[in-house]
Amino acid sequence: MKKKYTLLVMLLIVSVLISACSNYKFKATTEYEVQPFTVTNHRGEEVSLESFKGKPWLAMFIFTNCTTICSPMTYNMTEIQNKLIERGVEDYNIVAFSVDPATDSPEVLANYLSRYDVPDESKWHLVTGYDQKFIEQLALNSFKSLVKMPENSDQVLHANTFYLIDEKGIAVKNYTGYSEQEDGVSYDTIAIDMETLIEERLQQ
């Protein structure tokens, strides 16, 4: 009898969890319109805001000579992609804007990405091909984020944030991309938000 009761309780918990997941609605927390851009990715291809429209994408700011947060941020993004693959999510892109474009050529960015165990490199676009003023203005105007090259250092100041951009080019949510706490980066939350955003778009 006790075993049957335990089994019923477990089934009830599972059913509640499934119901909660199926009823989950994506809720935007920001509404930042990404300004038009045309850049070059790590494969030497020209890509633009227009070419990313039609499907959601995740964005971040990094640079290859970074000695602090960029490497763990890049690793965390690969873990998010693993979660997306586990959930069967396919229609998305990952865009990493270099905040040190004078150093980060497409070849340098490609070499940087090759250091990571990337589950599906075809979704990734590490981009460059602009000047320092451009990326500082893009970060400020499109993502309300600071990018600044210090006068006496090669370590560019930038946020440790991941941004979720919808299929129309609107930044609708942001997340911590790096944390010293083990549970600080919400891989599952980001993957579920991406999946839900895609599903809601298909239902429209």
Image: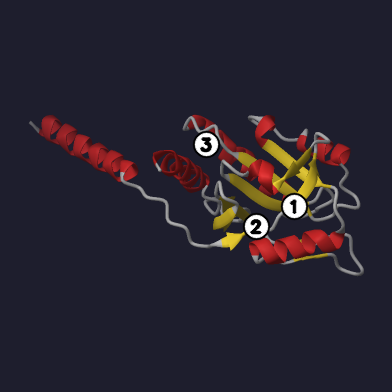
196 or 189: which is nearer to us? 196
Q: Amino acid at mark 3?
A: Lys
Find disc 2 in the rendering and name its residue: 34
Q: Please report whichever mark, 3 or 1, sits nearer to the chain's N-terminal start.
A: 1
Residue 6 vertical placement versus 26 (above, below): above
Q: Amino acid at mark 1?
A: Phe
Helix, strand or loop status at disc 3: helix
Find disc 3 in the rendering and name its residue: 83
Q: Is the residue marked by circle 2 packed among few (<14), some (14-19), or many (20+) residues within 10 Å?
A: some
Is there a contact, CB below 8 Å, between mark 3 and mark 1? no
Picture coordinates of residue 199 (x, y %)?
43, 39
Find disc 1 in the rendering and name its residue: 37
Q: Is residue 191 visible?
A: yes
Helix, strand or loop status at disc 1: loop
- Residue at the location (72% across, 35% down)? 116
Instruction: State which quarter of the image contains the N terminus.
Output: top left
Give the label, 3 or 1, closer to the camera: 1
Distance from Cα at disc 3 to Cα at disc 1: 29 Å
Quarter of the rendering containing residue 17: top left
Q: Is the residue marked by circle 3 packed among few (<14), some (14-19), or many (20+) residues within 10 Å?
A: some
